[in-house]
Image (cartoon, helix red, strand yellow):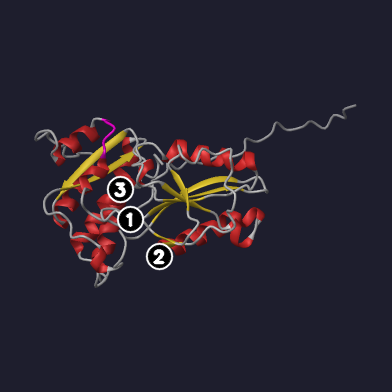
């Protein structure tokens, strides 16, 4: 959840593995409630279901089936019915835990301010243990251009980070190349340059790990973004000045100082999409097998 930049109470639905045993079901539900129940409104419980009740246990493919079901439910805005639950486990405190099994087909809860969020658990018989957080493309009905909010006018923040100054400079150069490439390509009819830059800032803020070597590029258009990236690539970043608590400049200054900044809050009221951005510039090293000491011709016992 921390890596995904998601608060536990924001997750709407859990596609559970559903062990089918009294002990296993209780362990899974208690764990889910302990994690996703934090800060959750009692009137908005975590919805839970499992595709295993439809098609049985697919062993090593069980998680794939759960992902497919969850993505389809996200796309259609409706969570399928969880079948065959006639006697809920007495080892689960259903009155206390903030969870509800979807025993009937259920409309996906709509927040209106963020994409749909779900989690998928797998404890496959093959030995694979995994937990995946899925994010929908939009905030609900009306997917497409109408479902994407207009970017808030003003200054944006592009957070850049790496494990070394050299890697940080190279990362800025990669963003410049990415910007040149996107500028040369025809933009999709449904996506304006402003929205593309807003999605870029969003993805870099909530979709990337933030390392100790940092630079915060403040920009309001393509040209100011290009100038900021060029400065970072040249090792001469324009350090942000604190313009007062709550300002984007203050957030940028705190970020560059290594603070644990809530970058997501810069996009409050917006619905943004994650896009493909330049990858991390890993340090290149050559590794060769050292030659062995020559073996003499003397016979050995």
Q: Quadrant of residue 139?
A: bottom left
Residue that mark 2 sits on: 75
* Between 206 and 67, the one nearer to me in the picture: 67
- Of label 1 and label 2, which has the lower sequence position? 2
- Residue at the image point whose x is 46% and y is 35% from the top: 34
> Which residue range is magenta in the image?
258-262
Please tell me whether mark 1 sits on a helix, a strand or a loop: loop
Coordinates of residue 83 in the picture (x, y in percent): 57, 59
**Residue 6 relative to residue 29: left or right:** left
Q: Secondary structure at mark 2?
A: helix
Residue at label 3? 204
The secondary structure that dominates the magenta segment is loop
Nearest the eye: 159 or 125: 125
Badge 1 or badge 3: first in the primary sequence = 1
**Image quadrant where one finds the N terminus:** top left
Query: What residue is pinned by disc 1?
Result: 115
Residue 6 shows in the view: no
User: Do the residues under discs 1 and 2 have CB atoms within 8 angstroms?
Assistant: no
């Amino acid at each position: 959840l921390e890596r995904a930049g998601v608060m536990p109470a924001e997750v709407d639905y859990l596609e559970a593995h559903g062990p089918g045993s009294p002990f296993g079901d209780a362990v899974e539900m208690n764990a889910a409630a302990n994690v996703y129940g934090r800060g959750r409104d009692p009137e908005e419980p975590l919805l839970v279901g499992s595709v295993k009740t439809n098609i049985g246990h697919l062993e090593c493919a069980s998680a794939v089936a759960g992902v497919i079901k969850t993505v389809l439910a996200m796309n259609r805005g409706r969570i399928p019915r969880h079948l065959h639950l006639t006697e809920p486990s007495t080892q689960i405190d259903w009155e206390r835990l903030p969870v509800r099994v979807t025993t009937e087909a259920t409309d996906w809860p709509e927040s209106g301010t963020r994409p749909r969020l779900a989690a998928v658990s797998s404890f496959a018989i093959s030995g694979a243990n995994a937990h995946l957080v899925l994010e929908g493309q939009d905030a609900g009905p009306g997917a497409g251009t109408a479902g994407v909010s207009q970017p808030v006018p003003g200054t944006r923040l592009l957070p850049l980070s790496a494990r070394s100054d050299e890697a940080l400079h190279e990362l800025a150069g990669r963003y410049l190349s990415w910007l040149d490439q996107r500028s040369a390509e025809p933009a999709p009819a449904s996506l304006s340059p402003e929205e593309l830059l807003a999605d870029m800032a969003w993805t870099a803020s909530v979709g990337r790990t933030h390392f100790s070597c940092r630079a915060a590029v403040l920009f309001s258009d393509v040209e100011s973004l290009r100038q900021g990236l060029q400065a970072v690539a040249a090792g001469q970043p324009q350090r942000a000045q604190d313009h007062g608590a709550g300002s984007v400049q203050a957030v940028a200054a705190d970020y560059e100082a290594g603070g644990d900044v809530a970058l997501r809050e810069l996009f409050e009221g917006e619905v943004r999409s994650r896009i493909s951005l330049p990858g991390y510039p890993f340090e290149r090293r050559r590794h060769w097998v050292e030659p062995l000491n020559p073996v003499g011709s003397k016979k050995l016992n």
